[in-house]
Image (spheres, rainbow, N blue to C red):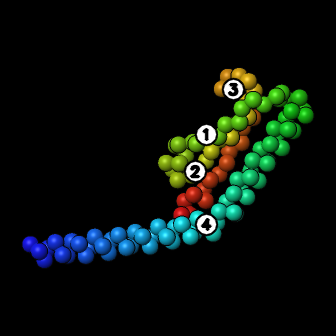
């Protein structure tokens, strides 16, 4: 019985060590790509703001009261992570002329 316990302890220690290495590797990869990912998100938001401003200048949209990021769960289940970004007036979800743009977050599946 002691031999079984020793083997289980060794396996558990090896598993813990392996997970520790995986977590460290993942954290290093996240840190290495953090700036690039952040820049990509900021650029997308800048593009979205330019689109909203263009619609406002054309007279198709008034003041913006809400900007919403919605995770499209069904696309995530298909391993196509997409967020829907919407700009709406004070009516928020009842805004018939909200401005929307999709954000592709497929980089998430590279980890």
C-alpha separation, residue under disc 4 versus residue under disc 3: 36 Å
Label whose residue precedes the other's in the sequence (3 or 2): 2
Q: Examine the image and state in which quarter residue 69 appears.
A: top right
Label whose residue precedes the other's in the sequence (1 or 3): 1
To which residue does mark 2 refer? 81
Q: Is residue 109 left or right of residue 55?
A: left
Label whose residue precedes the other's in the sequence (2 or 4): 4
To which residue does mark 1 refer? 70
C-alpha separation, residue under disc 4 versus residue under disc 1: 25 Å
Q: How far from the left and from the top, in percent, is residue 9?
A: 23, 72
Circle 1: is it few (<14), some (14-19), or many (20+) Cα within 10 Å?
few
C-alpha separation, residue under disc 3 versus residue under disc 2: 24 Å
Residue at coordinates 9% horizontally, 72% vertically from top-left? 1
Q: Nearer the viewer, residue 52 or 35?
A: 35
Which tag is nearer the camera, tag 4 or tag 3? 4
Which tag is nearer the camera, tag 1 or tag 2? 1
To which residue does mark 3 refer? 92
Which tag is nearer the camera, tag 3 or tag 2? 3
Label whose residue precedes the other's in the sequence (4 or 3): 4
To which residue does mark 4 refer? 31
């Amino acid at each position: 019985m002691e031999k079984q316990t020793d083997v289980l302890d060794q396996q558990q220690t090896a598993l813990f060590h392996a997970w520790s290495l995986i977590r460290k590797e993942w954290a290093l990869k996240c840190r290495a790509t953090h700036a690039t990912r952040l820049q990509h998100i900021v650029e997308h938001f800048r593009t979205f703001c330019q689109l909203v401003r263009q619609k406002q200048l054309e007279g198709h949209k008034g003041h913006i009261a809400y900007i919403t990021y919605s995770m499209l769960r069904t696309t995530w289940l298909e391993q196509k992570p997409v967020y829907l970004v919407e700009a709406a007036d004070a009516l928020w979800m009842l805004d018939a002329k909200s401005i929307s743009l999709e954000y592709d977050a497929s980089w998430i599946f590279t980890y």
